[in-house]
Amino acid sequence: MEPIVVAEGLHKSFGDTHALRGLDLSIPAGTVCGVLGPNGAGKTSAVRILATLSDPDAGHARIAGYDVVGQAGKVRERIGLAGQYAAVDDKLTGRGNLRMFGRLSHLSRRRARLRADELLERFGLMEAADRQVAGYSGGMRRRLDLIACLILRPEVLFLDEPTTGLDPRSRGEIWDSVRELVAEGTTVLLTTQYLDEADRLADDIAVIDHGRVIATGTPDELKATIGDRLDVVVEDPAALRPAAGVLSALAGTDPAATDEGLLSVALPGGGPRLADIVRELDRAGVAAADVRLRRPTLDEVFLRLTDRKEPVR
């Protein structure tokens, strides 16, 4: 698929702080790209440049073929942006907010009214349409903020940590809304601190650290890069030390331990079979309540990829 979002060698500095150090990104049309990274990695700086809110110091970016600096007006006609905090007016009703956004987007009064009602119905907010937004729940406010970005049916939607602070039910409602948009052809760039959110929504993931993309791929591809995980639960806490010795010898690295008697370690590709692991534990006199091999979680991949060894400057 042809990319609709392209960034090439983006640099951005704020004084002595280098937010972006040559960031490259390519997102196919009609997909969700999850952008992950530690705080200060450059995620928001990249989104601001792509959304024409900030100019890069160097490099180029295009949205639907239009340059984000030289053709910013054309880009803005094709994008929507929902930031980390809902940008809606508490004193207006939900319907009033959407009509206001429609008028600000140069829709006629009639078209703004019809579009507001269409979006309220589609995203399940019609019952609350005439209530003041100050009385909305956090999830309802975020959903209203999201659909306000859809007044002009954007080709690309930027969501910067859209579910921060929401309860699981509200997060699920936002996820359903995002899936519906993508099914209709909208491309979504999603930054998030919730790894399960990226795992469930993203077709592809870009991991950013120190202002660069350090890894890309589908969630499954990224998980495959660090091999399987071996989890061992010992029956007797006194067996943790000999069990750790066995796992360290098998994996070539020390396992992580928890208070519940669980040891976990990443195995190298082509590592030992489960039967061999159990046999080695038996030889060491370790009684294991559970031994299992599993795929790593996206959290574990993220922590492995973004293990910081130098400050970001």
Image (cartoon, rainbow, N blue to C red):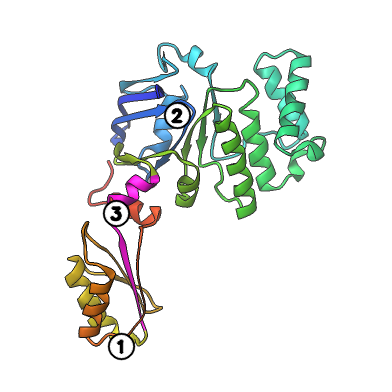
Whether residue 174 is visible, yes or no, is yes
- Compared to residue 48, the image places residue 64 above or below, namely above
> Which residue corresponds to the image point at 23% horizontal and 49% vertical from the top-left?
310
Q: What element carries label 3?
A: helix
Residue type indicated by callout 3: Arg
Q: Mark 2 points at which residue?
A: 48
* Circles 3 and 2 in contact, beta carbons < 8 Å: no
Q: Characterize the local packing of mark 3: few (<14), some (14-19) or many (20 or more) Cα atoms within 10 angstroms.
A: few
Name the element at disc 2. helix
Q: Name the residue under label 3.
A: 304
Q: Percent position (x, y) of residue 102?
A: 69, 20
Front residue (pair 191, 134): 191
- Please indicate whether residue 171 sits to the left or right of residue 262 in the image: right
Magenta span: 219-234
Residue 153 included in the magenta stretch of the image: no
Query: Percent from the top left, x then y, of residue 164?
Result: 55, 47
The residue pinned by badge 1 equals: 238
Mark closer to the chain start, 2 or 1:
2
Q: Which of 19 and 255 is in front in this view?
A: 255
Quarter placement of the C terminus = top left
223 displayed left or right of 199: left
Label 1 secondary element: helix
- Lower sequence index among marks 1 and 3: 1
Please state the horizontal and vertical placement of residue 32, each as a whole percent of the image.
47, 35
